[in-house]
Amino acid sequence: MYGDLFNAWKAEKAVGELQRLPKGFYRDASQYIKALKEEVRMLDEKTLRASLVSTEMEYAKHLASDLIRLRERKILMSAAEKRLISTDSLTDEEEKLYLGLTDSAEGYDKILKDIVEGRAPSLEVETVQKPKRILIRFLREIPAIAGIDMNVYGPFKPEDIASIPAENAEMLVKQGVAVRVEI
């Protein structure tokens, strides 16, 4: 697992775009670090083996921390700039957080729109809510589309997964371009 963690960190550090991680990557990393902690606890701290395992654990913790912070910055910037991220690139945990971030960004847009149109900003939940979204998986490549919420979605490649407004998602499903993803 150390090699996987190091390679993921190295790839994330080298490229400006968010790199793809397996859905269960963070869970696997936490189990790996937990196993190292347990091994250190069981060993005599004066042995070479204990020293090596302890050092490996500290390096693994550092790599995991730095990897998560790098990915957090990229995800936050994408959400703030309203750039879509393919959910294939996100872990399960990141996907849930990302959807909340995009909701917050749209809330700020609503406040801005109210202000520039001379209305008092409204923070009521029902005014900030966006149309219901549906998670879909694309079956074939399609160019970017304009959603009913006036946001641009895509372009998408086969096997990309995205959460888009329900009306757009239903249309794409009917056309055979995508299928619903049940969670």
Image: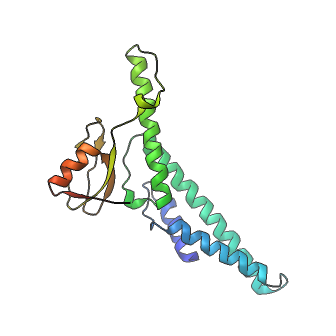
Give the camera-side residue of 59 and 41: 41
Residue 139 locus on image (x, y percent): 22, 62
Q: Please report the residue visible at 55 percent of the width from the left and 76 percent of the height from the top.
A: 3
Residue 80 locus on image (x, y percent): 45, 40
* Residue 6 in sight from this viewpoint: no
Location of the N terminus (image quadrant): bottom right
Give the camera-side residue of 57 and 37: 37
- Which quadrant of the structure image shows residue 57? bottom right
Residue 67 locus on image (x, y percent): 56, 60
Looking at the image, residue 121 lies above or below residue 13: above
Number of numbered markers:
0
Location of the C terminus (image quadrant): bottom left
Q: Please report the residue visible at 78 percent of the width from the left and 78 percent of the height from the top.
A: 41
Residue 131 locus on image (x, y percent): 33, 38
> Looking at this rendering, what residue extends furthest in the top direction?
118
> Looking at this rendering, what residue extends furthest in the right direction?
46
Q: Would residue 146 be found to the left or right of residue 61 on screen?
A: left
Q: Would residue 34 be found to the left or right of residue 92 on screen?
A: right
- Which quadrant of the structure image shows residue 42? bottom right
Q: Please report the residue visible at 44 percent of the width from the left and 37 percent of the height from the top.
A: 105
Looking at the image, residue 106 lies above or below residue 47: above
Q: Please report the residue visible at 26 percent of the width from the left and 55 percent of the height from the top.
A: 156
Give the camera-side residue of 55 and 113: 113
* Residue 73 in sight from this viewpoint: yes
Looking at the image, residue 24 lies above or below residue 142: below
Query: How is colour applied across the structure in the image?
Result: rainbow
